Image (tube, helix red, strand yellow):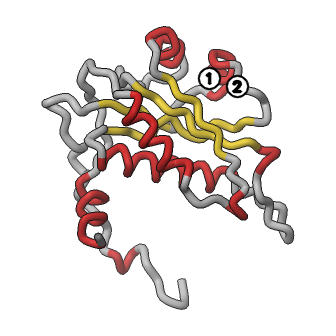
């Protein structure tokens, strides 16, 4: 199992060209299930996920971001600010962290199912709120644009370039 996960994590890349093909409802549910079981602070599960997969809704989304890549499926992953665990000694909410964990689980499950994805943070939150009537207490964190990779989809040139681990990992002292 260890090797399979590393193969998946290494092979997954940000897909920016998609086939003009809908993602099947069963596959959408499997991706959502992966987000549903993701760990959250004190298991509060503040994540809120908006599924955007109908043409009218996708058109509205395109007005909120130029980074939609004409994907046939988009998940807006956010969190309910009133439903997060908050660290007692400094008031730090883990809502954004929880939403990021959920989104990562969803992206990896999508990759395992042959569905490509890209994490998009470049969007207009106010436009998104207005277009989809997102309540004020819901904080959008990411748009996960998804679909089946086009035949000519390729990773970005720097996809496989990594800093040496010694520059990013430290033991007992930073």
Residue at (54% x, 90% y) in the render = 172
Tag count? 2
What residue appears at the point 30 percent right and 64 percent down from the top-left corner?
5
Q: Is residue 80 above or below residue 135?
A: below
Quadrant of the image for the N terminus?
A: bottom left
Give 154 or 9, whichever is nearer the viewer.
Answer: 9
Camera-side residue: 165 or 96?
A: 96
Q: Secondary structure at mark 1?
A: helix
Frontmost residue, 81 versus 126: 81
Do residues under tags 1 and 2 come within 8 Å of each other at their CB atoms? Answer: yes
Tell me: residue 151, above or below residue 83.
Answer: above
Q: Quadrant of residue 21?
A: top left
Kindly identify the residue that appears in the image at 38 percent across and 49 percent down.
Answer: 109
Label 2 Cα crowd, 10 Å radius (few <14 / some 14-19 / many 20+)? some
Whole-percent x and y of residue 35?
Answer: 52, 48
Vertical position of residue 164 compared to residue 23: above or below: below
Q: For mark 2, what is the residue?
A: 134
Q: Position of residue 91 (x, y in %)?
A: 83, 61
Seen at 30% across and 38% down, the residue is 115
Circle 1 sits on which residue?
A: 128
In the image, farthest residue toward the top: 56
82 vs 33, left or right, is: right
């Amino acid at each position: 199992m260890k090797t399979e996960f590393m193969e998946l994590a290494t092979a997954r890349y940000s897909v920016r060209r998609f086939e003009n093909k809908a993602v099947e409802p069963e596959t959408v549910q499997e991706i959502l299930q992966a987000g549903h079981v993701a760990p959250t602070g004190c298991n509060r599960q503040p994540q809120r996920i908006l599924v955007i997969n109908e043409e009218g809704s996708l058109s509205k989304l395109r007005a909120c971001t130029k980074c939609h890549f004409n994907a046939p499926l988009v998940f807006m992953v956010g969190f309910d600010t009133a439903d997060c665990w908050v660290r007692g000694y400094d008031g730090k909410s883990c809502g954004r962290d929880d939403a990021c964990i959920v989104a990562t689980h969803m992206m990896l499950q999508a990759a395992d199912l042959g569905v490509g994805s890209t994490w998009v943070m470049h969007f207009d939150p106010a436009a998104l709120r207005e277009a989809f009537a997102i309540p004020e207490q819901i904080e959008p964190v990411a748009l996960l644009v998804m679909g089946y990779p086009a035949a000519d989809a390729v990773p970005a040139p720097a996809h496989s370039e990594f800093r040496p681990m010694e520059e990013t990992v430290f033991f007992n002292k930073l």
